[in-house]
Image (cartoon, grey):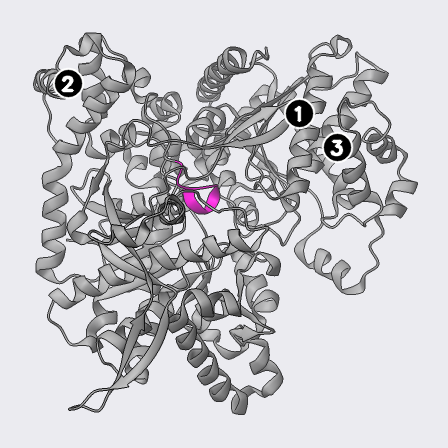
Amino acid sequence: MAFDIQEFKKEYQKKFEELFAYGYESGSKTEQYIALGDLVRGLYSEDWIQTIMEYNKKKEKQVYYFSMEFLPGRMLKSNLLNMGILDCVKQGMDELGLDLDEVARAEVDPALGNGGLGRLASCFMDSIASTGLAGNGNGIRYRYGLFKQKFNNGYQIELPENWLRNRNVWEVRKENKAVIVRFGGDVSFTQEDGDGKLRVRHENTRDILAVPYDTAQVGYNNGVINNLRLWSAEIPYGDEARFSTEEQREEVKRITEVLYPDDSNYEGRLLRVQQEYFFSSAGIQSIVRYFKRLKLDWSLFPDKIAIHINDTHPTLAIPELMRILLDEEGLTWDQAWEITKKTVSYTNHTILQEAMERWPETMISDLLPRIYQIIQEINRRHIDKKTPLYGEELSQRTAIISHGQIKMANLAIIGSHSVNGVARLHTDILMADTLNDFYVMYPQKFNNKTNGITQRRWVQIANENLTAMLDETIGTEWKSNPEEIKILKAHRDNKNVLDKLEQVKLSNKKRFAAYALQEMGIEIDPTALFDVQIKRLHAYKRQLLNVLHILDRYLQLKDNPNANLQKRVFIFGAKAAPSYYYAKQIIKLINSIAYLINNDPSINDKIKIVFVENYGVSLAELIIPAADISEQISLAGKEASGTSNMKLMSNGAITMATLDGANVEIRDHVGEDNIFIFGLKSDEVQEYYRNGVYNSRDIYDKNPRLKRILNLLIDGTIPGVETEGRDIFDSLVMYNDEYFLLKDFDGYLQAQYEADVAFSDRDRWNRMALMNIASSGPFSSDYTILRYADEIWKIKPHS
């Protein structure tokens, strides 16, 4: 997009005055941001309209990506970058006496996601547009989204994240595209004269208006602007009398109020199902309405529409599509089922059976009576068809409805034509173990699509210094073709390049150190090794293993303050689900250990711990470029893929890893000399589960070093964790250490010692960092999306 700096300055001043009726110089940073956002949205609006018109005119096949969460991060600089005007606007703002970075920080992170799942969805939306594919997102416009995390005496507390307190400049409310979503009521069937077909009648339903808010997804330098549609729950126009009490009105608002309501009670689980059906139904209705405008035969629906469900949350899209095709469009069951299977594809994001959603049968039958009937019929036909082929036992194990529960993963697999994992190891485990029964039945459905990230955000925006160094060293082709970053490998022995890379890292570490001092009052040494673990707090991700290592270093320094240990800053960022008590205990433990160690002068600042509050995309953009070590230490066979591992390696962090998820593929690309690998392998873990011989108490009793560390949890050394310390100690020693931390402990310490040695050799470390950056190109989400498009969705880049 060609843009003149003088023209920009004039238009910006004009836009600001239109909005606020005074000069921009007097405006707050938020007002300056809103004016700039409004101006930018106006600049791409013509391309947005044109893209949609072209898709419609050519009747181009489009993909609809259904996800419970999207985590886009701040969008201003991303949009400017993809439009090709970032430098122009930065200079124009500078000439106006404004700092673009300061103005951009006034944008509030949209609280629309939790972690990797939501960030992946947003990377994919960016890549779909940037690779020129016709694609749309479909989700929920949460009013508060995920909670705002605060620490109170080391404990996590959850506050509402009012991210819409000003306004979201990027969204456009589309009242004319609103649809009605029905809950509850009674279903009956009537036979009308004429064609003799049964008609479905709904009575006494609770009708909710789903209003879409559309947000442009700007492609990188290609003029393609796709659409992310998020739905808001409202009272239907003219139906206010049916929602006369405050409680009734609040029930409607709650549907799109928070991401992942507390599911530890029935009411929370019921609300979650309402959310999942709400955005699935609204999205399917919107798609069907679009298809009908094409005036094509229903048999062509899969040739024009691809619906992708991101994890099991949108699985109710399958029976909802069936409902519309059967009840509203009059298709036969076989016609509707064939269309649905050919249209829908499913990504599985977990190996853990307990993480796969299942809902009480009675809950679905009460809340969604017609959907329940359709699920029953899908299940009946599945069992009837498969039993003669595979026997009753195997067929029943794959049933959708079993023991009073509806299994959403089973419905997703049976009702789709493609099931993919998100890393090579993950997919192998799904086929061989977790979903083996389905693999036996449907081997042709299973495939792998290793996750990816967009380097546009995680390098070009998050790490401007590295971007400039790469441009100077290898040119700019890597920006549009990420695999070209491999050219950097030619400079692995170039001392000048290695020194420049070290200076880039140091400047990023100084930036984070300034943040830690200003926001948290913690003074850290930028020359120390920054050891980073940033991800959702869950026992299988083993933040606790990291804690045991920190305590080991602390004891070494208490025994000998002059011990030859590399100075380290341990950086954590993590939220625990509100009802996940054990994870919240771990947060309290980390914060208490941080208080103990950060205030102990006897260790000479050899260890500092920084646990940032309210970790999200913008904090990740601050932390990741500063990281030296990337902690990817989940128990092998538990993490589906991971994407923080890819973001960190692309910024020159060295991965400290088990052979889990995409770590396996990262090792294959960077080579064993440029990664620290330790711990049990996936097949070894599975063997322990099978033979049942793992005994954590025995390890505790026979390992004096480990025993001393674990005793710190219960001997009063760590302040304020009497209950938490005892519970965590018991989980590891008395209750047999579910995720094998004690088994992997010695190997982890050895890998950390090797990292100390490597970091002390600056040329060696910088070479390792360079090789990680140079090997990161294949993990671009652009390539992942092109594989989805070619192998699953059957769509081609827009021309």
For disc 3, the neighbor class at 10 Å (few under 14, some 14 to 19, many from 20) is many
Camera-near label (2 vs 3) is: 2
Left or right, 684 with respect to 696, comes to left
Which residue is at 76% across, 39% downward?
Answer: 728
Q: Is residue 670 above or below residue 640?
A: above
Identify the element where label 1 is drawn.
helix
Q: Which residue is mark 3?
A: 548
Q: Quadrant of residue 218?
A: top left
Q: Which residue is mark 2?
A: 16
Which amino acid is tagged 2? Phe
Front-lying residue, 258 or 283: 258
Q: Which residue is mark 1?
A: 591
Alpha carbon distance from label 2 to label 3:
53 Å
**N-terminal label among 1 and 3:** 3
Magenta-tinted stretch: 111-119
* Residue 478 spot, x, y in % from top left: 32, 36
Front-lying residue, 345 or 471: 345
For disc 1, the neighbor class at 10 Å (few under 14, some 14 to 19, many from 20) is many
For disc 2, the neighbor class at 10 Å (few under 14, some 14 to 19, many from 20) is many
Left or right, 627 with respect to 723, comes to left
Identify the element where label 3 is drawn.
helix
